[in-house]
Image: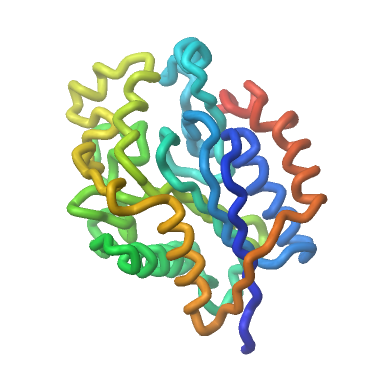
């Protein structure tokens, strides 16, 4: 099998609604073979909370406070738990389950992507590690975690014992979408400000931001988001089965994303649906 062309996109800052809608638009384009497999990195124009596709949030999030303080709330296409976005770098990967580098079962794809991310983090001096324990599956927990950072699962990425990267994946026919957040700084404790009952998490010892992710983990003095973007592109290009090129969004992808923003990602019906 020959090499597969992957498009590397840096779409810069966007609000949460557009960032999530754009991932869906790219999934559509890749499924129709109008766009190549795509690795996208992006930032957040304003603080935001994204929640997992199946996560129940109606009674958990203080939407009034979010609105007053300019924190957007939307639902992702992928599963998992809530993530507070501010100083993190978002990434998404959209490709085929038959891809020579990232194909296979969901767990295979998840691991392959995270192994690439770990190598990129090594390249900028971060001693990141893959959590490769079969026991790290969240089973047996008596507390239902609200925040992504309050549980460590198999193949998560850790730094100094804390969870550094949170990711989730979903399949659409033959195409996978993996969305993730790479922590730069320590914003995750802020999600507690926007919960209706943060005391419940304190009582359980699982206050978001103080579980497996350590809020004392600071490395922004030596690593920038641009450093991280360059390392990710470089590592993608190092994979033998891949030929990668920096690319741009197609006009159709932008148009579709705009439509999805109004149809779904800004809609209370979409955000509150479960």
Colour scheme in the image? rainbow
| Residue at x 44%, y 36% (from the top left corner) | 85
| Residue at x 52%, y 43% (from the top left corner) | 43
Residue 29, x across and y down, in percent: 75, 57
Residue 9, x across and y down, in percent: 61, 58
Viewport quadrant of the N terminus: bottom right
| View extreme (bottom): residue | 1
Across the whole image, how many numbered discs are drawn on residues? 0
| Residue at x 42%, y 43% (from the top left corner) | 88
User: Can residue 82 be spotted in the picture?
Assistant: no
Residue 125, x across and y down, in percent: 28, 63
| Residue at x 71%, y 48% (from the top left corner) | 25
Residue 86, x across and y down, in percent: 43, 35
Q: In the picture shown, does residue 36 fall above or below 58?
A: below
Q: In the picture shown, does residue 223 fall above or below 127?
A: above
Q: Please tell me which residue lies in front, 271 or 274.
A: 271
Dividing the picture into quarters, in which one does residue 209 lie? top left
User: Can residue 244 be spotted in the picture?
Assistant: yes
Viewport quadrant of the C terminus: top right
Left or right position of 104 against 173: left
């Amino acid at each position: 099998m020959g090499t597969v062309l992957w498009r590397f996109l840096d779409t810069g800052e966007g609000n949460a609604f557009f960032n999530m809608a754009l991932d869906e638009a790219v999934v559509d384009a890749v499924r129709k073979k109008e766009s190549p497999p795509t690795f996208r990195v992006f930032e957040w124009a304003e603080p935001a909370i994204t929640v997992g596709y199946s996560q129940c949030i109606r009674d958990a999030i203080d939407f009034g406070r979010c609105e007053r303080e300019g924190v957007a709330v939307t639902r992702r296409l992928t599963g998992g738990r809530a993530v507070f976005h501010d100083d993190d770098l978002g990434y998404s990967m959209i490709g085929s389950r038959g891809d020579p580098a990232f194909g296979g079962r969901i767990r295979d794809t998840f691991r392959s992507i995270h192994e690439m991310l770990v190598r990129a983090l090594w390249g900028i001096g971060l001693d990141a590690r893959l959590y490769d324990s079969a026991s790290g599956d969240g089973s047996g927990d008596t507390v239902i975690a609200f925040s992504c950072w309050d549980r460590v699962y198999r193949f998560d990425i850790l730094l100094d014992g804390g969870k550094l990267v949170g990711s989730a994946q979903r399949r659409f026919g033959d195409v996978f979408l993996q969305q993730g957040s790479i922590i730069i700084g320590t914003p995750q404790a802020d999600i507690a400000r926007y919960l209706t009952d943060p005391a419940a998490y304190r009582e359980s010892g699982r206050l978001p931001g103080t579980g497996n992710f350590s809020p004392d983990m600071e490395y922004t003095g030596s690593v920038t988001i641009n450093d991280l973007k360059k390392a990710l592109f470089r590592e993608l290009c190092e994979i033998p089965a891949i030929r990668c090129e920096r690319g741009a969004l197609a006009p159709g992808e932008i148009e579709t994303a705009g439509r999805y923003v109004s149809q779904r990602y800004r809609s209370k019906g979409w955000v509150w649906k479960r």
